Amino acid sequence: MTAPRVWIADKMSPRAVDVFRTRGIDVDNRPHLSDDEKLAIASKYDGIAVRSSTTLKGALLAAATKVRVIGRAGIGVDNIDTQACSRRGVVVMNTPFGNTITTAELAVAHIVAAARMIPLANASTKAGKWEKARFMGMELTGKNAGVIGAGNIGAIVCNRLKGLHMSVYIYDPFISDERATDMGVHKVASVAELASIADVLTIHVPLLDATRNLIDAEIIAMMKKGSILINCARGGIVDELALYEACKSGHLRAAALDVYANEPARKNPLFELDNVYCTPHIGASTDEAQENVAVQIAEQMSDYLLDGSINNAVNVPSLSGSEAAKLAPYVDLSLRLGQFMGQLLAPGYAHVNIHFEGHVATLNRKPLINAVLQGLLSQSMDEVNAVNAGVLARERGIELVEQARDNSDHFNNLIRVTVRGDGGERCVSGTLFDGHRPRLVSLDQCDIEQTPAGDMIFLQNLDKPGVIASVGAILAHHGINIGDFRLGRSKNREYAVSLVSVDSSPSDEVCARLAELKNMMCVRRIALDTLCV
């Protein structure tokens, strides 16, 4: 059998070549080729390993007709057309953990450098000056550190800052109060609150629609006079014009940046300011990080090319074809249960229990667990998929418990999802009718049957007369047609739950009016994909 062939298209650690060859992979280490040279050889390879220099899109990706796997030695895959790869059945992998410590350490280095004005003091001293009085720094011990995003990198930063004896505050809606306590940090409710109490504010979130210009003029104005802002995450999260004005006016003591809205950043007004310290996106630039990601991507690509194993893929789940067909309806049900709970409970999840009963308990449950987590987290996070959902849950300290038994008291198959967090605890159960039609069959302690699809309103109320009539009247007044109204009652008849299927999503005003009804305990708007049943 011919050995698989891999092209290393960008410069990376020689250890990657060693790994490929040790595993029996035919490898060509050919970085720094011209575009024409890349197009000429792309069709020869089963796998292509890249960093950020080579862009696998358009003509070059089309020319790679044999490629089965693309490996990105690093986290970001912006230089790879993952949608086109998915359509072609090409697995795209990255290495999400290889440079986390390195990036975190750079952020801490920037904090110390900015607090003590080290870059300016260095330049002044080398210029033959001796300006002790000019470089009056800020002591970090006892100061408040604000960390936006306490995931993989942010959590390391928190730990390091505690070592500097700073009081650490975080804003991360996906971290539960319980997890924050375990980390030894204080959780706050908003970026604005964090900005107002932090002496040093550092950012560790991805660039998404929700985080673009997250630190704008309004937030910067809320920061303490004389505080410091650090961004080693992604350019575009900080409004650079607003930052320029704040640093120039002296409202901020200093800022330090490793990332910029436009890169490579050869010109930027911030470069004019002595109190803005800049590095050229070197968060992952250490020998250790470069070796880590190179070795990891070589091992992952070798596993896939030799035995089909998939690790850290960004566009496909780890499933064989026969398993995928068998599990498809259960994956759909699991995803809907997670989406439902993600809209019923606010983020800040501490514990997820997934219980399987009946035949489903005998199947490969990992894709079902990932589907539940994907549905749960996708209601408040972007870029969640079946592959990274488990990782994101672990990063946020969500405790996952799986239980299974191969018999069920009432159903051939049952999946029950219980979620506990800052918003309390909720439980939903679902099954498949006829092996393919998903149904919700219980909410909390109430039996209730409903198709998990379309626009719905979840209601919980004290089990008293008049609630259903009042709900109907409000919806009718606002022109919202009821397609179905399912009701369940707790066993002690203390409260009732309802799932109201409606033809159009209720507005905030409608939900507020429902919440004001006498005996109403909870109102939630639920929107799930439609399906054919």
Image (spheres, grey):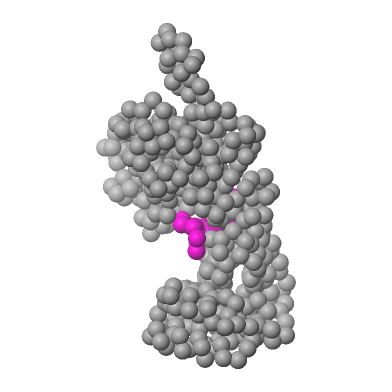
Residue at image position (56%, 70%) is: 344
Image coords of residue 256 (percent x, y): 44, 32
Tell me where residue 432 sits by quadrant. Answer: bottom right
Question: Is residue 319 something one can see in this rendering?
Answer: no
Closest to the observer, 117 or 525:
117
Tell me where residue 163 sits by quadrant. Answer: top right
Residue at image position (72%, 82%) is: 409
Q: Which residues are magenta?
A: 379-395
Left or right: 357 with respect to 219? right
Image coords of residue 156 (percent x, y): 60, 40
Left or right: 136 with respect to 159? left
Is residue 389 inside the magenta stretch? Answer: yes
Establish if 454 lies above or below 383: below
Establish if 386 lies above or below 476: above
Closest to the observer, 2 or 487:
487
Establish if 89 lies above or below 162: below
Question: Is residue 353 something one can see in this rendering?
Answer: yes
Closest to the observer, 236 or 512:
512
Left or right: 68 with respect to 447? left
Is residue 387 inside the magenta stretch? Answer: yes
Tell me where residue 426 sits by quadrant. Answer: bottom right
